[in-house]
Amino acid sequence: MQAFSELHSSWYENREGTLVKILPKNIEELLTPISLAHWIMGDGYYSNGNIILCTDNFSEKEVLLLIDVLTNKFSIKAGTKRRANKSNVVYRINISKTSLPILKELVLPYIIPEMQYKLGITDID
């Protein structure tokens, strides 16, 4: 039970009685090809040749840090995609179509066939 508690506290912070999602300090260590695959399957989508990762609950600074990790650790080119919500502005990660071959090589072994459409792969065998 303590392991779950530690995991939870690395991703959430109590701010004035409200739990706020935060980026763990060791995100570079945590972001692996397997975790990236799970992120894409859960909160990613394919759009016009790019992969978009939903990061709506993170600050712009945290999103930029995630982009730095993707670039430095995996040589993936990405930028921010600004999106206006009803109540605020959020930032998502836009992985460039030029980095799609690198991304596919990293994550395809961990993407279940039913979710490969999130990488722009349309024929499922």
Image: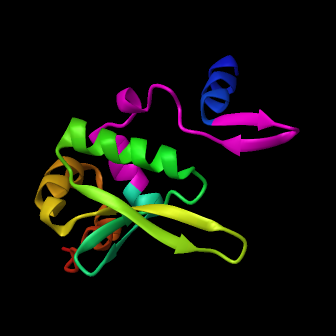
Q: How many marks?
A: 0
Measuring from the top left, give residue 23's x and y in whole percent. Answer: 54, 38
Q: Quadrant of residue 120?
A: bottom left
Q: Nearer the viewer, residue 3 or 77?
A: 77
State which quarter of the image contains the N terminus: top right
Q: Residue at x 24, y 44 (%)?
A: 71
Magenta-colored span: 12-39
Viewer-side residue, 93 vs 41:
93
Tell me if residue 80 comes above or below residue 60 in the rendering: below
Residue 42: x and y, percent?
A: 47, 59
Question: Is 37 inside the magenta-drawn segment?
Answer: yes
Chosen colour scheme:
rainbow
For the C terminus, which image quadrant?
bottom left
Q: Is residue 93 above or below residue 5?
A: below
Residue 112 locus on image (x, y percent): 32, 59
Q: Residue furthest top?
A: 2
Horizontal placement of 61 versus 44: left or right? right
- Establish if 10 lies above or below 48: above
Q: Is residue 14 left or right of residue 78?
A: right
Q: Residue at x 78, y 34 (%)?
A: 14
Q: Please say if 70 is above or below 53.
A: above
From the viewer's perspective, tell me whether residue 120 is left or right of residue 63.
left
Picture quadrant of residue 80: bottom left
